[in-house]
Image: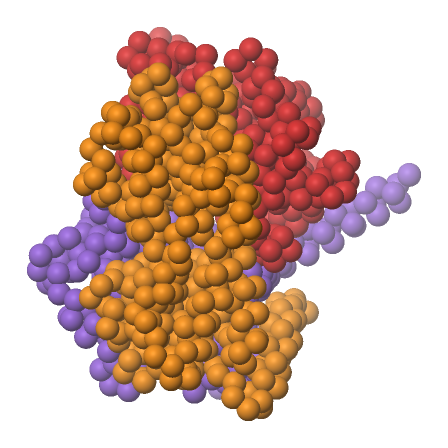
Chain colours: A purple, B red, C orange
Amino acid sequence: MTDTQPMRLGKETVGVVNKLKVGIARRTEGRGVALLVIVVVLVAILEPTTFTAYSVTLGRIALIGLVALGLTAVILMGELDLSVASTLAVSGVIMASMPNIWLGVVAALAAGIVIGMINAFFVFYVGINSFIATLGMLFALRGLAFVLSDAKPVRIADIDAGIAFGTPLLGPITPRVLIFILAFIALQVFLSKVRAGREFYAVGGNRQAAFDAGIPVRRRIFTGFMISGFVAALAGVINTLERTAADPTAGSSVLLASFAAAIIGGVVLNGGRGSVLGTLIGAFSLGILQVALTFSGVQVDIQDIFIGSILLIAVISDPTQLRSAVTGIRSWFQRREKSQAHT
Amino acid sequence: MTTQSIETIGEVGIKRNQFNLLVWISERGVFVFTALLVLFGVIFVNGFASLINITDVFYRAAPIGIVAVGMTFVVISANYLDLSVVAQVATAAVILIGVSNDYGLPLAFAVALFVAVLYGVVNGIAVGVFKANAVIVTLSTTFIGLGILRWLSGGSIFFGPEDGPIRAFGQAKIGAIPLSAIVLLIITMILWFVLTRTNFGFVVRSFGSNKEATRLSGVNTPLVVIGAFVITAISAMLAGFVLAAFSNTAVSTMSDGYDFRALAAIIIGGTSVFGGKGSVLRTLLGVIFVSVLTNILVLSGIGFGLQQMAIGALIVLAVSVDALARKVTKK
Amino acid sequence: MRRFRILFPAAAALAVAGLALSGCAATEEADTSADSADSYNVYALLPQGTDQPYGTTYLPAMQARADELGIDLTITNSQYDADTQASDCEVAVAAQPDLIILWPAVGDTVRPCLAAAEAAGIPVTATNSDVNPEDKDLIQGYSGPDTYGQGVSSAEMMCDAADGAPTNIIVIDGATGNSTAINRHEGFADYIAENCTNITILAEQPGNWNKDDSQIAASEMLTSVGAENVQGIYAADDTMVAGAIDALKARDIDPSSMIITSIGNTFLGNPLVISGELYGTVFQSSSWDGTNAINVAYDVLTGVPVEANLFMPSVKVTIDNAESADVAPEW
């Protein structure tokens, strides 16, 4: 062919508006944004204290969202990491057990990375399904936290440092919120601009194709689990500092909230689709909702029913899955009609 | 046995003469290890072989076992697990004692059955029709279910009458074997029959092996998933009854940890979490293994933290063996 | 396709609308009571509510007293999670109430909460579980049982009954890592170590506040150390001791032949004391606890001087006083 023009398939998208439309349609955060808008509007009308006391809400969002950010990296690759709750507890206990705070922080973060490596080892080298591998680690690490702490809370060496850590630096920004913002930026940049990060999507979308394309899948999986472990350990360190003591039973509420934030934000559990931005939006929705419910004094049972329902609706209404579900139902009816027509 | 013929397909890739330790462990391992563990207990652990202790092992095994054999259906259908068994067991226990105290047993059974089927259908539709991830779906139904249970029951403990039929059932034994263990055995037999001898069972297994192929062959796959979750829910209901009968009390927190403990038993029994492979008998063996192990650990005075670590390590070990064995058979 | 993009937001809108309606009801109530002359806004940060039997009876007593005194209560339940309670505390401080009632989930972790409240000028009182000694200057007063002291009381009863004779016992603790369990254990163990060295603890396992787990754990411990070597049992609450007593009965051991003590004087425990199967328990009145939490708070709000500690009398309940109306069980 002498024509050097590239082959065009379909209608060309011309104009800013159309390009914008196509760009937005491809994004996965749609449902997250929709829920956020609804939550913000309703909360603003009914429980505005949630916004006037925004430092509290920001703190709650940072609490939920930090672990969720790390989890997103793993979920994008099509894997799961259930061990984050116990990683949080163990790293907190390790940190509090050290005589020096800085030494404790380093030790705790190192533990998180090591746990991530162990998870990745089982997933990649041994070939275990990540759900099971991290489930076993969830049990084992929880037991380890109990053993290391003698099943009791462990106080940190320097209590005042811990309380200082909890005080705001600038306006509503406490060190926790600052770390959350930094973590978000770091992960967002990594997953969208750095090649290694972008390859996470490929590893999740089609593992075999990623292998064939020459992507170092092993290295990516290790990196992903190490990120998740590191972030969970970071959350453990922050919690322990703010509480001034490490509680070996900590972390159980984190598991649900983190997964919920990621899923509400549009991260697909099978991997390959989603974004850290979506997780952030999910964390916002969940955090605002939780704080609003607490302010309004609604019973915990009812809170659980609400959050459970919202999560259920979120997870069954993934647009791509809905499409296939509807097609399936429709074709089932069509087949029945056809077979009835034949009789 | 149909389960064996599926296993044979994997073995064909290995040379007749070649004996692979990993494959052997993953297929026969749980039988041998359970036997070894029991032997270890009889020889080395003081009091293990006494009648009373055997009864205790059965008491440990029965409620979890009934949940686990039912949940095997969900795992075999490659849907990970059903976390909402926690809510289902507690709900059934509270309904049994709470309703029968005021309105009699038959109504309690009816209400519990209705609620169990409701759980199964809701979970099944979400996972089977909407194709959502079972972990998240059942996590959310757990929250909703426990929330409703606590809201309606007010969180109180319910007590059965001291001389009532529930208590009598919980105390009854045949020799050293409590009635609850007999119930476990009967349910295992029934579910074994369903999984291996009925068309439904066959379809569940094939769905777990290859969802797409099963769907294309004309099977109504959403119904398969719903069926698996309903079976799990009814098993959880029966487990709740057994648990309530044993202690003659019911409270919303009594089923804590049942989800993961049941899954641990299923995995250690050798059912693959990838789906397709496994059996209800293996799950029963896995339950016995975990119960005997915990029993031995307590008899030896080992603390809770170490018990958790042991079980976690075991899960990882069991699944590692299974995964490595799969790799070998693929070559 | 577009239809389904609407499904999720619509359904979510329904869910949040439901929330809104209930929130509406709550705010309406708040508005009307705020209009009345001296009504106070108080936040109660609790670690349990209707998810546990004690909390289930604590709450109504607290609410009733609050209504009598014109206090508008907002109640949170952190389910014994320290991080959740810290977050609830932030919410409470931001709401600028007149006072905060704190029931610490984990005593070691509440200092930051107390410091924040102090910085915001909000007085704090403690209920049920006291703060650590070094944090006492940050609260205005404490009311409640002394969970450490309850362990001590139970130990005192056991020591009295043992009367100097060498006595071996087995111990059943509450849920691992739970602060009530830890305090009661330490109270019991410390007292025994200092004042009653003739008592030896042969084995110890958690009963998880459950009757069924406790029965199995007790039975296994008896097997492990030999039932003939055991002269007494201590369990951290009545529900668990009922399980241990069932374990004895299953072995045809008469419970009244052993020294058995626990804590709670609940619907399960009180009848056991009357029948002689349980030697002694410690009365814990959930309604006293709830009512006095408000009493102390009200005194602080109205400027009445308040003692540092208002301890719930740890009334020992033995067969002598078990049927008295003063110690009628509440939960």
Question: Residue C190: image x %, image y %?
Answer: 22, 43
The part of the image, by quadrant, that contains residue C28 is bottom right
Q: Residue at x 24, y 78 (%)?
A: A167
Decide if residue B94 is in sight here: yes
Question: Residue A314: image x %, image y %?
Answer: 56, 62
Q: Nearer the viewer, residue A77 or A244?
A: A244
Q: Nearer the viewer, residue B233 or A34?
A: B233
Q: Quadrant of the N terminus of chain B?
A: top right
Decide if residue C238 is in sight here: no
Q: Residue at x 52, y 85 (%)?
A: C39
Tell me: A114 left or right of C311.
left
Q: How many marks?
A: 0
Q: Residue at x 60, y 44 (%)?
A: B158
Tell me: A218 left or right of A272.
left
Question: Residue C271: image x %, image y %?
Answer: 55, 38
Q: Is residue C254 above or below residue A326?
A: above
